[in-house]
Amino acid sequence: MKRKCICPACKTILAFDRTKYSTVKCPKCTHEASVADFEETGERTEKPIRSQSGKFYRPGKLELVDGEEMWLSPQRIITLERGINTLGRKSANLEVSVQLATSDTRMSRKHAKIEVKMTADSTFVHHLSDADSANGTYHNGDALEVEEVIILALGDTIRMGQTTFKFVE
């Protein structure tokens, strides 16, 4: 079971299974210490952990917030993977890595891309861009320009067609 712990050097909040490791290296400050040196916050977690600086230690997720009347699946959370996540309306004829189960015809079959990149400090950043969709991709209500790339932050909204998602941990 993962638990939230605090790095003794930089006070970054980390999550790891204390029973599996004898030493841990902080991805932020690279301080390496015995597991016993990491103070436990007492909280259990199965969610991605952000440091105090707002960095992600796992790829984020998209949560459906609007467009439920067209949504065809009980799943409301879309988990992003490391690499390029191409999002679009589910189709047997087109390969996209994240096929969305919707009857929203304003959403293209290949609509947007979210590239999840790992940085040198072992954190993740999420880059959103339009995939040349017919009706555009909207970030927090603003249309993305051709070839524009947005770095996502917690709580940002992404609209594709008439369907809106919120970027969450």
Image: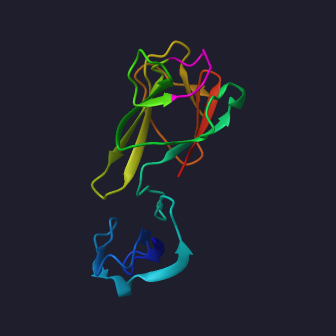
Q: Position of residue 99 (x, y in %)?
A: 48, 28
Indicate whether 43 appears above or below 36.
above
Looking at this view, name the residue that lies furthest to the bottom: 36
Which residue is found at the position 42% from the left and 49% from the top?
Answer: 59
Q: Is residue 28 left or right of residue 67?
A: left
Indicate whether 6 appears above or below 143.
below
Magenta stretch contains residue 94: no
Looking at this view, name the residue that lies furthest to the top: 134
Q: Quadrant of residue 33?
A: bottom left
Q: Nearer the viewer, residue 25 or 30?
A: 25
Indicate whether 44 appears above or below 62.
below
Q: Position of residue 42 (x, y in %)?
A: 55, 80
Which residue is found at the position 56% from the left and 19% from the top?
Answer: 107
Q: Nearer the viewer, residue 102 or 16?
A: 102
Magenta stretch contains residue 102: yes
State the extent of the magenta-drawn residues as a range: 100-108
Q: Position of residue 15 (x, y in %)?
A: 43, 69
Which residue is found at the position 39% from the left and 74% from the top?
Answer: 10
Which residue is found at the position 33% from the left and 70% from the top?
Answer: 26
Q: Magenta region's main secondary structure?
A: loop
Q: Position of residue 56 (x, y in %)?
A: 44, 55
Q: Is residue 46 left or right of residue 149?
A: right
